[in-house]
Image (tube, helix red, strand yellow):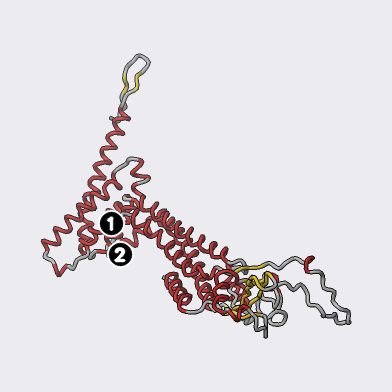
Amino acid sequence: MFCILSGTIMTFKQNLGSIIHCISDARGDDSSFADAHATFVQDYCAAQGLYTLKEVYDKSWPDEIPYPGILQMKTIGCFPGRQFKNGTPIQCPDEKDLKPFTTVYHVWYMFVPFYFCAVGIAFYFPYTVFRHLSGIYDIKPMLNSLALDIGAYTEEDISRRIDNVSRWLYIKLDPYMNNMLPYTQIVHKHSIFYTVMLVKVMYLATSVSIFYATHRIFDQGNFALYGYDVLMSIPQETSYKVMDTIFPKMVGCEINMWGRTGEQSESLLCVLPQNIGNQYFFLIFWFLLILTILSNCISVIVTIFRFIFVSGSYKRFLATSLLNHEERYKLVFTHVGTTGRYILLLCADHSNPKIFEDLLEIVCSLLIANYHKRKRSRDKGHSRAEGVGTKGRHGLSFVDSTV
């Protein structure tokens, strides 16, 4: 929701107002191209040429530089005419012998609205995966049958609904509890656990990937520690320096053009008001991403613990359905697997406690009866296997005395 709202606000800001405002460094020069073609210059710089200088961020401002990452002239290596305190003049090296400044271009701000929309879609995708893999569409009609007001229906209508739902639940839960095939016991019985784990891992991977991708967007500063650095700088009242390092409000621009004397270049100083809002939007976004990553990590661990320790889910099941503990309830709940427990918890959440208790009585009786029937069949099969004789030395068959 935050991503969609942020993207919408930034889209309106970019389309309803001027993105940047630029002035030329050719002070008093009536022939300044920027002054004569202000609209063209601002559109050109907004689309192509905004930059700051990486090495200049280390300078103290406003003492040594006018703005973070900005020099009056991009190519200046030293200041001619300056002297040391003892009066010795400073010898400026040849410009060709100096290493050029590292130019950091800022064009990402144009894509921020689309980026936030893409992030919102990325977070919604795991939810669509869960809806299609969890089988919730198969359970919805049954849940609608349970969500009824007892006073609005006759006892005959309620009994008929309970019979229909109990039949559906028995058909759904019986394979989980009584089918001993390896595929059913390993895969089908716990399919909801695998689906939930997949979705939670997808959420965790999505949040980490978005955090890393956001960090990689900015060539200057460290977004990975952005929120932490801002918090640590608040007591020193220097948070604006941390923000302006990643989101500079003042940037440079150069326009190359053909003039009377050939190729000419004009340097501009531009204010980027979009970054005033970006500083705080991304600060909130940083904290939300950190909280999302932590909550997803905790969620993955909790899901694994719930799969291993069934007793906690069973207590929640009793509390939700307002039931007292009975061994038959526990027997069914622990033997139907995570998929069956998920269905039972959904039924308990969406039905009247009295209706669910009557429903559970019927389903438990059917499941336990079939459970014991299958168990007796397996015991007889084992007894027959144990009673098969082994031939002795003279070809006689000896039968186990327990048969």
Judging depth in this view, the residue of 198 and 24 nearest the camera is 24
Circle 2 packing at 10 Å, graded few (<14), some (14-19), many (20+), is some
Judging depth in this view, the residue of 101 and 318 nearest the camera is 101
Say what amino acid the circle numbered 2 marks: Thr
Judging depth in this view, the residue of 263 and 296 nearest the camera is 263
Q: Outermost residue toward the top?
A: 394
SS under mark 1: helix
Say what amino acid the circle numbered 1 marks: Tyr
Mark yes or no: residue 339 visible.
yes
Residue 85, by quadrant, is: bottom right
Judging depth in this view, the residue of 281 and 42 nearest the camera is 42
Residue 100 image offset from top left, x and y in percent? 72, 67
Residue 233, by quadrant, is: bottom right
Q: Is residue 165 above or below residue 33?
A: above
On screen, residue 310 versus residue 329, left or right, reads: right
Circle 1 packing at 10 Å, graded few (<14), some (14-19), many (20+), is few
Residue 177 image offset from top left, x and y in percent? 30, 47
**Residue at left offset 61%, top offset 66%:** 219
Residue 312 image offset from top left, x and y in percent? 38, 59
Residue that carries the numbered disc 1 in the rendered image: 137
Q: Are marks 1 and 2 in contact (CB under 8 Å)?
A: no
Quarter of the C terminus within the rendering = top left
Q: CA distance from mark 1 to mark 2?
A: 22 Å
**Residue at left offset 62%, top offset 82%:** 237
Mark yes or no: residue 227 visible.
no
Residue that carries the numbered disc 2 in the rendered image: 320
Q: Is residue 358 above or below residue 47?
A: above
On screen, residue 60 versus residue 105, left or right, reads: right
Chain-order first, disc 1 or disc 2? 1
Q: Outermost residue toward the front?
A: 260
